[in-house]
Image: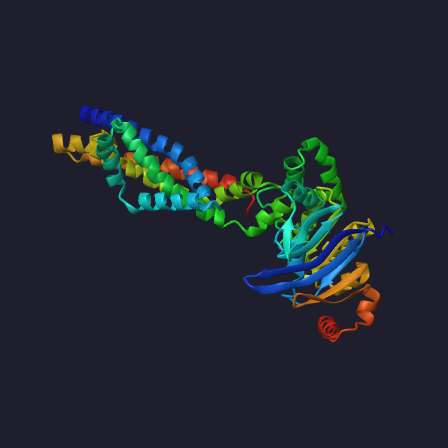
Amino acid sequence: MDNLVNTILLMLEGTKTTLNIFFITLILSIPIGLLVSLSRLSTIKPLSWLMELYIWIMRGTPLMLQLLFVYFALPMVGIRLSDISAALLAFVLNYAAYFAEIFRAGIQSINRGQYEAAKTLGMSYPQTMRRIILPQVIRRVLPPISNETINLVKDTSLIYILAMNDLLRVARTIVQREFDMTPFIVAAIFYLVMTFILTWIFKRLEAHYGKYEV
Amino acid sequence: MNNQPIIKMHNIHKSFNGISVLKGIDIEVNKSDVLAVIGPSGSGKSTLLRCLNNLETIDDGTIQVAEDFLTTSVNNKAVYADKITQKRILSRMGMVFQQFNLFPHMTVLENLLEAPVQVKNMKKDEVLPIAEDLLHKIGLFDKKDAYPSRLSGGQQQRVAIARALCMSPDIMLFDEPTSALDPELTIGVLNTMRQLAEEHMTMIVVTHEMGFARDVASNVIFMADGNIVEQGNPETFFTHPQEERTKSFLTNMLK
């Protein structure tokens, strides 16, 4: 029994690292993703192309490779980051690209008539985006954002490659030391609890932002 | 009746990807006039309206609204006014769309308040009585806190009219305002428009409602293939059309 409590305490410590990466990545990559999507849709062609290139690279290579690159390759050009900063940089860059594409799809799904109505009422482009388009986009992108967010919870386990003690790495260490599979089950339960809470939050958000729908 | 034109469009040319949809249109609208624009689909009548309020750009021609020029024609090319003039011109015109285009995430009242507050920087308290007055006028005050999805098409379109009026325009443009509605629901919308005409609002109405054009319009234009085929006052236009093209269109419409 003592053993189990000990295991759980150690794994809670690992969960802290997991949640740290999760929250900071989420908080930074959503606004960055929005900016990237707006730039990608910009009529300034070079800006749009640059964003396309960025999105292509981030979605086209494994997140694991990006983590290794930031941590091991950047020091060669004199950029040395702590393990947590390196992990965050890679995660934020990667997730912002995915969020950008989600936002782009959302923005493009809004009927042209909404822009025209706003324009004939004299609203500027920033006013139209802020007041008319984005509030409707939020409603539409919540389901795919929820998907990505749940993915992020699980993707955080990749940081073991930088020797960071996240939830899964802690579990594996204990398993290997004690020849007992319980930590894996505990880890699974931890992940399930986290994703359950997220699912619930997104359900509430969808209800809140969808209240104008029949 | 004031006979100074408030809208003058001269020699308007517009093409989409090389296909000419407006081939040198001239129209004049006097203050308090109601101009009905009729014609078959694809005749360019909606495009004409959309060019007037800058939702489309024209290739050549002059567009004048009151004393301001939206475009002038230089070497057979339309040259647009600066942004400030454009803004001033557009603020004189309200637009009503076939698909209503209400903001779905805002209540009826919020739809009305949005532009005056955001664009004219008016205080909510200043706009509120104007908006509530308009809602009383269209008979939808009791729906002020409803979202558009809860309203019928006809109710949505009346709210769209009120939303445009809330910016106190001098001119109202209607782009087939009843074409997306069941016949039963068009009556309410047409009544609201009729009421507006009686209050001497200057209106351009692109429509398939011949009855409305006949009763309410002061002038009727018939367009086909990017040209104005015939125009006149509704009385002579509907009873004694001159052109064959007009006659066949009217026969089909009134069948």
> Which one is in front, B219 or B69?
B69
Question: Above or below — where is B193 with respect to A145?
Answer: below
> Which one is in front, B254 or A192?
B254
> Which one is in front, A99 or A75?
A75
Question: Residue visible at 59% across and 40% down?
Answer: A124
Question: Residue visible at 12% across and 33% down?
Answer: A179
Q: Where's residue A75, x and y in %?
A: 23, 30
Question: Residue visible at 35% across and 45% down?
Answer: A53
Question: Above or below — where is B37 with respect to A91?
Answer: below
Inspect this view and state whether residue B243 appears: yes
Quadrant location of residue B98? bottom right
Q: Where's residue A122, x and y in %?
A: 64, 42
Give the position of the N terminus of chain A as an image quadrant: top left
Q: Is residue A10 left or right of residue B107?
A: left
Quadrant location of residue B21? bottom right
Q: Where's residue A45, x and y in %?
A: 45, 47
Q: Is residue A145 left or right of residue A88?
A: right
Q: Residue furthest right?
A: B1
